[in-house]
Amino acid sequence: MDYLSSLPEGLVPDILVYLKSPRDVCRSSAISWGFKSAADSDAVWESYLPSDYREIISRSVSPLDFSSKKHLYFLLADSPLLVDGGKLSFSLDKESGKRCYMLGARGLTIVWGDTPIYWAWRSLPQSRFSEVAELVSVCWLDIKGKIETRLLSPKTTYVAFLVFKFVRANQGFESLPAKALVRFVGDEEEKSSTVYLKQPSTPVTSEGLSGRFPQERKDKWMEVELGEFFNDQGDDREVVMQLMEIERGNWKHGLVVEGIEIRPKIHT
């Protein structure tokens, strides 16, 4: 007998709102027909949407059509929404419902980025943004982004990633260490880490290399972790994320920058 179906109407959605995550809600739908119906209700899924989701949607560069709050939740989890003139994308972490952002290349500060002999701006069908930055040739690589903590979910550890790829004819990045840092604006202490934009071509070349290496994403771009930070109360602060290679002075070309993504840290 399905005893849960005998609960008063409206009580089950109230129970589901208190579940820990959207994944728990989806699992609960297998318990009974009563839970399945409630698990699809707008009341439940609106509780997992950002409190200002209407304002976020109003900033979208194109209309967003959805049939229910559950539909909207999974749209935002599966298809990043371009906002603020297309320089920023917003999405939700599917497992937790926490906010994620990517600063497009046009929203970053790239040293010499507006100088055509050093950087070119391209349109790629593989990118969510209308333009990406392609490195023509520089000896000084410096890419920086900023985000306001009020845009992010509070009480959450975030990780920042540089999202990029290489054109076939690239040079200057093999076993080249770069400096990465993530810090709050105003913090005097600067903790940097070493990252590489290319995996070593052979085990021999990887000997003695210490730092973080890139990984391929599901969307076929590459990403490398720049660092992490804890967003406490989501107060009005700014976080700076930066990648630099300014010491060796060797010429580099063929790097394509899509942006810097900020998403919740996955705890394993």
Image (cartoon, grey):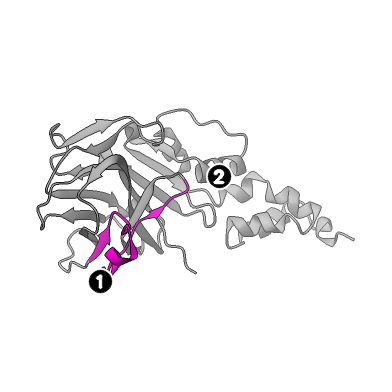
- Residue at point 58%, 63% (across, down): 20
Magenta highlight range = 193-218
Q: Amino acid at mark 1?
A: Gly
Q: Are marks 1 and 2 in contact (CB under 8 Å)?
A: no
- Residue at point 17%, 50% (across, down): 142
Is residue 78 shown in magenta? no
- Residue at point 18%, 55% (across, down): 244
Which mark sits nearer the N-terminus, 1 or 2?
2
The percent coordinates of residue 234 (x first, y second) are: 35, 58
Residue 168 appears in the rendering: yes
Q: Counting other residues with Cα less than 10 Å from the Cα at mark 2, is it few (<14), some (14-19), or many (20 or more)?
A: many
The percent coordinates of residue 233 (x first, y second) are: 36, 62
Residue 106 appears in the rendering: no
The percent coordinates of residue 224 (x first, y second) are: 33, 56
Front-lying residue, 166 or 86 = 166
Q: Counting other residues with Cα less than 10 Å from the Cα at mark 1, is it few (<14), some (14-19), or many (20 or more)?
A: few
Dividing the picture into quarters, in which one does residue 228 lie?
Answer: bottom left
Q: Secondary structure at mark 2?
A: helix
Q: Which residue is mark 2?
A: 73
Front-lying residue, 25 or 217 = 217
- Residue at point 65%, 56% (across, down): 25
Q: Is residue 255 left or right of residue 159?
A: left
Q: Secondary structure at mark 1?
A: loop
Dividing the picture into quarters, in which one does residue 211 lie?
Answer: bottom left
CA gap between label 1 and label 2 equals 45 Å
The percent coordinates of residue 17 (x first, y second) are: 62, 57
For residue 264, above or below residue 222: below
Residue at the limit of the structure toward the bottom, as seen here? 208
For residue 53, above or below residue 114: below
Q: Which residue is mark 1?
A: 208
